[in-house]
Amino acid sequence: MMKMDPEQIKGVLARADLLHPAERVEQAVETMAAAIREVLGHQDPLVLCVMNGAVIPTALLLTRLDFPLRLDHLHATRYQSATRGGELEWLTRPRWPLRDEHVLVVDDIFDAGTTLELIVRDCRAAGARSVHSAVLVEKLRPRDCRYRPDFVGLTVEDRYVFGVGMDYKEYLRNLPGIYAVADVDL
């Protein structure tokens, strides 16, 4: 990991394309929350936030889920501060035992699908009674995996995106909208 110069970060943002403004993100989260309430509102689920990208999407969802639930986190990544995915690396596994739990995995983006597919597979192997997944963003692209998330907020074209938890080299997660990186910044 390397710190970036603040002017460089401002330049990345200035060259980026705004794909989904904050208002659209809020509407998408509300729609996802309504669907999640229908499916899991009576299950006392264990919500697993996939660090670091899903911190903001998870927080936005939790404030809209008006039923008993518990929160834990896991950290499995394929990016390690890069803009292209590599091998899956487990940094932190959930603290709660997953056996007989109804699990909701919340992630920021469904890109190649490999990370989420492996996380869901791991939850099932740990004995979860059910495993659902929610992603704020699904990237429209071909995939090798067959897994698909249960709840999707928004879709984006096949570009590197940041904002609302998703990062550009560990920066710009805190933006309320979703942006696509300009080709010059990849």
Image (spheres, rainbow, N blue to C red):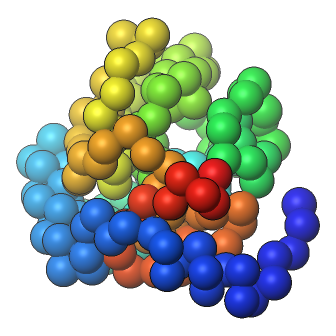
- Please state the total of marks drawn on the protein image: 0
Q: Residue shown at 61%/86% (left/top)?
A: 10
Residue 13 coordinates in the image, percent (x, y) = 52, 78
| 138 sits to left or right of 34 | right
| 17 sits to left or right of 43 | right
Q: Residue shown at 89%/67% (left/top)?
A: 2
Between 48 and 101, the residue placed more toward the observer is 48
Q: Would you place residue 102 above or below residue 14 in this image?
A: above
Q: Is residue 147 visible?
A: no
Q: Residue shown at 44%/12% (left/top)?
A: 145
Q: Would you place residue 103 above or below residue 53 in this image?
A: above
Q: Would you place residue 56 above or below residue 50 in this image?
A: below
Between 146 and 181, the residue placed more toward the observer is 181
Residue 62 coordinates in the image, percent (x, y) = 35, 69
Residue 170 coordinates in the image, percent (x, y) = 71, 66
Between 78 and 91, the residue placed more toward the observer is 78
Q: Quadrant of the N terminus?
A: bottom right
| 72 sits to left or right of 37 | right
Query: Extreme right residue here?
Result: 2
Residue 104 coordinates in the image, percent (x, y) = 39, 43
Q: Is residue 68 visible?
A: yes
Q: Quadrant of residue 51?
A: bottom right
Query: Extreme front residue here?
Result: 184
